[in-house]
Amino acid sequence: MSVITGLVAFGNSIGYILNQWENLGVFAYALPFLLVFALVFGILFKSKILGDNKGVIVVIALTVGLLSLQYDKVPQFFAKIFPYAGMGMSILLVALIMMGLFAKPDEKWFTITFASIGGLIALIVILSALVENEWWGSGGWWWSQYWPAIVAMLIIVGLIVLVIFATKKQT
């Protein structure tokens, strides 16, 4: 008897188990909490900004993880962004396979092209999640109100970066 047949024989299929986990809040609360906790803990521990006191780091990471779930903003955003991220990674995998037909990974244009495709996909994933979460586009109040200032700021920052990297050092 196969594993899947054995699961179905006991009245539980993988779909049933995943639905039960969803009903228990594993996807909406447990996994987002664990992700936020792990990121905050990892950043604080690696940066040593609070020293080596793991107790303080755990308390801060626990607090930030729990507070991030307070108004359902984080679970809703995670529910939007991760499906798009999965689709983006699938597209990136297909691009990698197709590019592998024509070049070796150690060629410079391969790396630049792959990084460009990855950056474009990341931008599309982020923007798609923001639009669906009504932070952007017609539903986002801040974008419709402040878009001229945001575009002007991006242009100014872009020009500053261009000037900094385009000027040659004079000795």
Image (cartoon, rainbow, N blue to C red):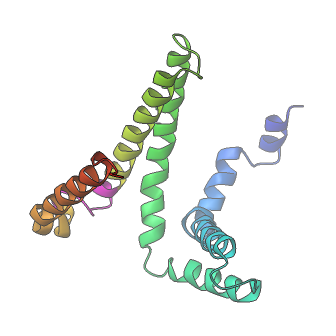
Find residue 76 and report its horizontal and vertical position in percent: 43, 64
Location of residue 132 in the rendering, given as x and y in whole percent from the top left corner = 31, 55
Q: Is residue 98 left or right of residue 157?
A: right
- Name the residue: 19% across, 69% down: 142
Range of residues picked out in magenta: 130-138
Q: Is residue 3 above or below residue 166?
A: above
- Of all residues, the one furthest to the right in this rendering is 1
- Which quadrant holds residue 62? bottom right
**Residue 11 at x, y = what percent?**
77, 48
Q: Is residue 39 left or right of residue 76?
A: right
Residue at x 59% of width, y 60% of height? 22
Which residue occupies 41% across, 72% down? 73
- Residue 90 part of the magenta-drawn span: no
* Residue 132 forms part of the magenta stretch: yes
- Depth order, front residue of 78/102: 102
- Vertical position of residue 145 compared to residue 160: above or below: below
Left or right: 43 in relation to 10: left
Q: Residue at x 20, y 53 (%)?
A: 159
Q: Quadrant of the N terminus?
A: top right
